[in-house]
Amino acid sequence: MKPIWIVDDDQSIRFVLEKALLREQLPTRSFTNPKEVIAALDAEQAPPQVLVSDIRMPGGSGLQLLETVKARYPGLPVIIMTAFSDLDSAVSAFQGGAFEYLPKPFDLPKAVELIRRAVNESQREEVALESPDTTPEMLGQAPAMQDVFRAIGRLSQSHVTVLITGESGSGKELVARALHKHSPRASGPFVAINTAAIPKDLLESELFGHERGAFTGAQTMRRGRFEQADGGTLFLDEIGDMPFDLQTRLLRVLSDGHFYRVGGHSAVKTNVRVIAATHQNLEQRVKEGVFREDLFHRLNVIRLRLPALRERQEDVSMLTRYFLQQSARQLGVEPKRISEPALQQLTAFEFPGNVRQLENICHWLTVMAPAQVIESKDLPPEVLQPLAGGGMPATPITSLATPTSAPFLSAPVLPSAGEPDDWQTGLGAEALTLLKAGCEDVWEVLSRKFETQLILAAMSQTRGRRIDAAQRLGIGRNTITRKIQELGLE
């Protein structure tokens, strides 16, 4: 993560903020005046995640620094601090594009919370331009995949709207990125949003943005995904789950390219190519009255069906070797090889989770397989013992004693019906072992492992969807995101 830059000539302010942000695992870098910041920006290609600056400092003004920074990086959140809490300073800060105005002396927890909000805004505004080197590979020799490749080629000079259908985990976003990469809009941004992963009351703001003061908590103007994707491509994943009332607004944008921000009164013009995707039968949802028929026809200009992995079993071997290489690069280890019998058993598996499940299995094997050559016995239980109903049993990744830094792959084994529920006995034994060994942070160690297993189980059941996992666990979306970061489960 990029650091948060703190600019203040007061050493005590810099020290207090540095320590507070360090406790939140937010990296920092401090400066004493604006000249140092400008020099750092000139010397480095990457801007900070957030800039926190005083207004009055020897050698320059924070408002002048705000103007300079905003000219270079319009999306960078800047928080202005000052001990002189006058109206002119506040108005000047907001007119200059400041994210927020922080009068001194400030309450430290509230200041950290404000910076955390600015970090979230910064990450939201980072719409990466995909280059050929960073775009994920699309692999496939099966005839069904070759048909998809040919369709992408035919659409390479087109701006037409595309609807991608296919099961979850089959790679619909990869197809959308490929369509963007090989289109006349390749130099523009590619922006993706999962409409099913965002609560209904926030989705409108995510798509269209909002004006400052449009609702409680809207403390600054925010651009929506349509504005961020201007000149490029907007990928609307899981479009079948979009709330009915928002479908009307989406239809209007697709019709004439105009929309209003939430709380806004001026129409915003955008030039965006829309690619939508769904795992659902939209025709059926139209019949059920939960999806607008006119929106369906507007999206269904060109339809690409992505085959499930079980329909392209000849690609399993190629994909397995590719994912094993990829996992090894990510972990900085030597790539593992897979024996022919193990590969045959993997190929015979039906993969209810499709390519995403195969990728997760390869991550799991890279970490868990004991030898450099993967044998059949090393394969995870869902491959060795598939359920008769075609379901996907939970995969053991760790015991309670396994470090929580293991990759986020699958869930712990849960006792099946009829088995004695003795996890409490095991927990007590583990605690006793640690206490006898003289461990001084038993509570912290076991709490982290307990939370890890809960999150792994929930994410396995929801196939990686954080919002659904949080709801199943009875916690908030921000809580599960924070826990995943704290426990090293990204």
Image: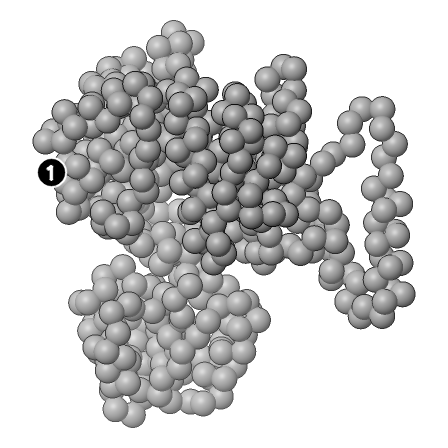
Query: Toward which corner of the image does residue 435 lie, by quadrant?
Result: bottom right
Which of 76 and 316 lies nearest the eye of the viewer? 316
Q: Is residue 126 above or below residue 475?
A: below
Q: Which scheme is used to colour this image of the protein?
A: one colour
Q: Is residue 167 visible?
A: no
Residue that extends furthest to the bottom in the rendered view of this protein: 58
Find disc 1 in the rendering and name its residue.
184
Q: Residue 35 location, x and y as percent?
A: 25, 86
Q: Is residue 52 above or below residue 381?
A: below
- The amino acid sitting under disc 1 is Pro
Task: Give the percent coordinates (x, y) of residue 139.
Answer: 33, 33
* Residue shown at 44% from the left, 75% from the top: 28
**Which residue sits at x=50%, y=43%?**
337
Question: Which residue is pictured at 46% across the width and 43% down the height?
Answer: 324
Residue 46 in sight here: yes
In the rendering, at what x and y percent does residue 482 appear? 56, 54
Q: Secondary structure at mark 1?
A: loop
- Neighbours of disc 1 within 10 Å: few (<14), some (14-19), many (20+): some
Residue under the image location 52 percent in, 21 percent down: 348
Q: Quadrant of residue 154?
A: top left
Q: Nearer the viewer, residue 463 or 194?
A: 463
Q: Is residue 218 above or below residue 350?
A: below
Measuring from the top left, give residue 81's x and y in whole percent. Answer: 38, 77
Q: Is residue 2 above or below residue 38?
A: above
Figure label count: 1
Quarter containing the N terminus: bottom left
Left or right for 295, reference 392? left
435 sits to left or right of 326: right
Along the viewing direction, whichever of 318 and 423 lies nearer the viewer: 318
